[in-house]
Image (cartoon, rainbow, N blue to C red):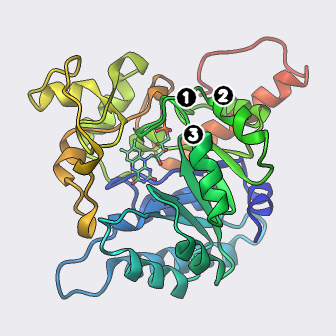
Amino acid sequence: MPFRETIKSLRIPVVGSPLFIISNPDLVIAQCKSGIVGSFPALNAREKDGEPAMLEVWLKRITEELDRHNQANPDRPAAPYAVNQIVHRTNKRLERDLEICVKWKVPVWITSLGARVEVNEAAHSVGATVLHDVINNTFARKAIEKGADGLVAVAAGAGGHAGRQSPFALVQEIRQWFDGPLVLSGAIARGDSVLAALAMGADAAYIGSAFIATEEANAVDGYKQMIVDGAADDIVYSDLFTGVWGNYLKSSISAAGMDPENLPTSDPSAMNFGSGSSKPKSWSEIWGSGQGIGAVDRVVPAAVLIDRLAAEYAAARRRLLGEEPAARSVAAE
Ligand SMILES: Cc1cc2nc3c(=O)[nH]c(=O)nc-3n(C[C@H](O)[C@H](O)[C@H](O)COP(=O)(O)O)c2cc1C
């Protein structure tokens, strides 16, 4: 299905973004059943040596559970899901993972850290949409030249690897030449902000950090609580942990014995996605998060978070259409 058709079929125009280690089938299934695109990085599905590919086990489960849901609920079918591929030379699993995604006809592919023609061709061979994530207009042009169908514009304040540019600047520049599917990422955690992304020219919003504070997310309780307790001031931008600039919770850095206000810099040669074990310590002890977590005030099932986003989105629309009097900043209960 063309991605714009997919977006129209969603309850709200949101993609639950892929989160290293954290996204798992439970979260993806809950997101899709609640009417937003759910996603996970292929590298999260790891098997022990000699065991069958965990990626295949996950895709089978997601496909079957969503099919069952669709048969039982023809009036509110699940949204399609997406798999994220880290297209970096150190990802030794890429070729195998692509074959598995082709076999299971994964409907949406999200590519990061490198745009490659053959990955796009593999996706297109099964009618899938490819969204490539970019942090600036130059990378955006390259991604489309190499055959991606759409873009995820990762602006300043996004969790994990993030850009430095204002979302306004990024979307304005991309929209000057690209009229295809565009998803905006970075610090979006309320339904009002989803509508703002659309007003700016994006087709959908990409939400990551808010989903860390859900019951389904594969994160320890301390991490979830730090998302609930934290706000933009609690986030630091650093390239130390993976060699790529990203946003992290300062308290997790202090807990690991470092001073988050005085971190040394690293360089891109530190990147390593070999067999899915990209410095897992960095990501399990140093916790990634975007700046939008001030909007997150409790750990809830993903369906409850999506209900909140949908209610806020609808209220913001009514407000802008003049059907509701004053702007509210309190979170919808
Ligand atoms: C802990 C964490 C892990 C992430 N891992 C990935 C990943 O493996 N692949 C990817 O494409 N993006 C990854 N991201 C980035 C998200 O997909 C997305 O751009 C970001 O979460 C959006 O900003 P937000 O967190 O402020 O909502 C990660 C983000 C976080 C917070």
Return the residue at label 2. 169
Which residue is pictured at 78% across the width and 58% down the height?
A: 4
How much space separates mark 2 and mark 3, taking CA atoms? 9 Å
Q: Are marks 2 and 1 in contact (CB under 8 Å)?
A: yes
How much space separates mark 3 and mark 1, taking CA atoms? 7 Å
The picture quadrant where one finds residue 95 is bottom left
The label number, if any, that marks residue 274 in the structure image: none
The picture quadrant where one finds residue 153 is top right
Which residue is pictured at 77% across the width and 67% down the height?
A: 2
Q: Percent from the top left, x then y, of residue 274?
A: 24, 66
The picture quadrant where one finds residue 197 is top right
Amino acid of disc 2: Ala
Crowdedness near tag 3: few (<14), some (14–19) or many (≥20) residues, C-alpha within 10 Å = some
Crowdedness near tag 1: few (<14), some (14–19) or many (≥20) residues, C-alpha within 10 Å = some
Quarter containing the C terminus? top right
The reply, left or right, for residue 306 in relation to residue 301 is right
Q: State how many labels appear.
A: 3
Return the residue at label 3. 136
Which residue is pictured at 20% across the width and 45% down the height?
A: 282
Q: Percent from the top left, x then y, of residue 5?
A: 80, 62
